[in-house]
Amino acid sequence: MALRGPLSRLLRFTLSSCKQNRSHSVAILGAPFSKGQKRRGVEHGPKAIRDAGLVERLSNLDYAVHDFGDLTFKHLEKDEHFMHVPFPRTVGRANQLLSGAVSGAVGAGHTCIMLGGDHSLAIGSVEGHAQQCPDLCLIWVDAHADVNTPLTSPSGNLHGQSVAFLLKDLQNKMPEVPGFSWMKPFLSARDLVYIGLRDVDPGEHIILKTLGIQYFSMRDIDRMGIQRVMEVTLDHLLARKRRPIHLSFDIDAFDPSLAPATGTPVNGGLTYREGIYVTEEIHNTGLLSVMDVVEVNPTLGATPEALEATTSLAVDVIASALGQTREGAHIIRKSGLLVLYRASKRTQ
Ligand SMILES: NC(=[NH2+])NCCC[C@H](N)C(=O)O
Ligand SMILES: [Mn+2]
Ligand SMILES: [Mn+2]
């Protein structure tokens, strides 16, 4: 597992503190990895999202954009199933590498955008973020809860189990999966909120209920409206104290009519406006520290248009999480400084 030049340089430059107010510099980390599930193609996600114009869009938002390229993941030869879980050591090693890269980027003061790859990558991404920011909170936007343990998982796929590896509260329910001895669970159930759920396995439902995890299913969004959902989400996570946000955004949270190029689509997902509202509100906290965008699988777009819709949607949610507004913005002079004026910030 080797690192490319700029990334290895980044890793050497780590600071221990976690800044509360994120800088105006963004690190992009590509994670072309697909072994957390059985459909190949999702490893081409980072290239497809870059090709949809990501760097240019973020530069237009006035960020210093540092694209650190793609990590290089190796498939381990001797990697037998663990129970019915495929490629445990390969997934474990990939996440260990990614964890170091995310920790390096956050430590160097960047807001970090991790482009997947499948959602098993959130294990390393959140773990690396927590190395720098132990008090982080996690917003998981997804059709799925991804909180199966190897014992509850119907598929065995690790992309459906990422959250179980993170949660302290599940420690005694998790067997020792080979490839993951480098990490320990660190997240409390109360530091996590789900948005967009609509395909939750029975074992996952037991976990959500017994741990009292705050979640908003698509039915909750229908009932409460996305504005109230975000109000309760941010209140739940930030009312006691302001702290860094990790946003893990699975593109299958969106309705498949908007994001068809993904491996496990589920009908009845977020509308474009609901998804963008989620990221706008997260941006407005000023606390976004790391964002994952995962499960874009370019080989599953039935037509070039279907693929284009999915990748440009991925770019839109990233830009929105980083401050692109629908109402517009302009530069003003304030005590001798030029500052970007966004009217939506007035209501904070
Ligand atoms: N990251 C995802 N798209 N996860 C889909 C998970 C589907 C199912 N719950 C499973 O455990 O296999
Ligand atoms: Mn999903
Ligand atoms: Mn997911």
Image (tube, grey):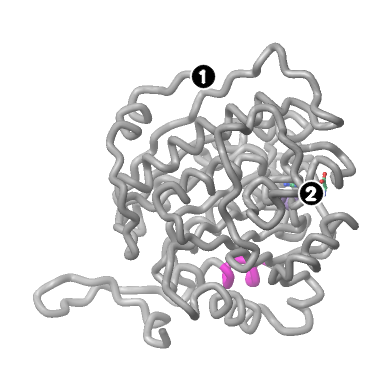
The yes-or-no answer for disc 2 within 8 Å of ligand 1 is: yes
Mark closer to the chain start, 2 or 1? 1
Secondary structure mostly taken by the magenta-highlighted segment of the chain: helix
Check disc 1 and report the residue beneath it: 1
Taking 204 as reference, is 331 left or right? left
* In magenta stretch: residue 113: no
* Magenta stretch bounds: 272-278
Q: Give the image location of residue 178, x and y in percent.
A: 69, 27
| Residue at 85%, 30% in the rendered image | 83
Taking 93 as reference, is 241 left or right? left
Q: Give the image location of residue 46, x and y in percent.
A: 55, 37
Q: Name the quadrant containing residue 273.
A: bottom right
As shown in the figure, which amino acid type bears the numbered disc 1? Met
| Residue at 43%, 47% in the rendered image | 131
- Give the numbered dot on residue 148: 2
Residue located farthest toward the top when viewing the structure as drawn: 77
